[in-house]
Amino acid sequence: MSNMFCVNKSGQKVPVYDAYYTTQIGVLYPREAFGWDANWGGEGVFCRIVFLNSQGKLQVGFLKNAIDYNGLPAPVGVYPYDRVYIDGNWYVTFKFRRTENVYTADGNYWGQVAAGMRVACLDDGFMNSLSGDTHPEWKAINYVERSTDKAWIKVSGAGKNYGFVDTGLSKGSMPDTISMYGSW
C-alpha cells in the first residue's frame, strides 16, 4: 500500500496519539488534511500520520482504530478542485493559495507552483491521492499549471513522469488555510 494525502471526512474530531497509544498528542478536526503513512502499521488499525499540531508544527502521530471512523482516511483525489483533460487522459486538479515548491520523484527541487495556479494528478484511483514515502505531506503530481499562460507543464525527473508538490501542510491544515485545496 502506498502513502496517501488525506482529509478527515468522518465529521468527528479524531484523537491522535503517541507511538505507544498512551498519550493523546493532538486532534484531527473535520475536513482537516494530513499525510497518511500507509507503509507503516496494519490495515487501518494502527495508523501513522503526519499532521499539523496545535503549536503549528508538523508532527508524526498515530490514529488508533481509524477504521472505526467512517470517512477516515478520505483520499484527497476524491475531493479535487476540478478535472481536466490533458494529452488523452483525465486528471484531477488542486488549486494553490500560496506558492509552493515542486520536487522530482527522487526529492530534488524542480520548480514551483504559483499561488492561484493548479497542479494535475492522473485520475486513476492511485496517483490522484498518492503522497511521498519520506514526505507523506507532499502530494504526487504529473503537471503544474504555468502562471504566465496557463499551459500544463509536465513534471519529470529521475526517470519518472511525476513529481511531488509541497501541499503547505506546515502552514495550515484546514480547507481555508492549507496551500493546496480541493473541494473538501
Image (cartoon, rainbow, N blue to C red):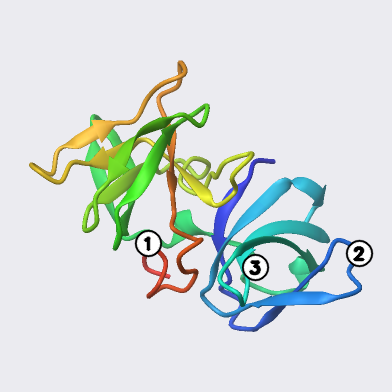
Label 2 crowd bin: few (<14), some (14–19), many (20+), radius 10 Å: few
Residue displayed at 9% across by 43% down: 148
Looking at the rendered structure, which numbered label has been put on residue 179? 1
Residue at numbered disc 3? 72
Residue 70, picture quadrant:
bottom right
Relative to 47, is 128 on the left or the right? left
Residue displayed at 45% across by 65% down: 171
Dot 2 falls on a residue whose secondary structure is loop
Residue 23, picture quadrant:
bottom right
Examine the rendered structure and indicate whether residue 138 appears above or below residue 161.
Answer: below
Q: Position of residue 176 (x, y in %)?
A: 37, 75
Looking at the rendered structure, which numbered label has been put on residue 20? 2
Residue 49, picture quadrant:
bottom right
Q: Position of residue 113 (x, y in %)?
A: 28, 46
Quadrant of image for the N terminus? top right
Q: Earlier in the sequence, mark 2 or mark 1?
A: 2
Whether the residues at callouts 1 and 3 have beta carbons within 8 Å, the answer is no
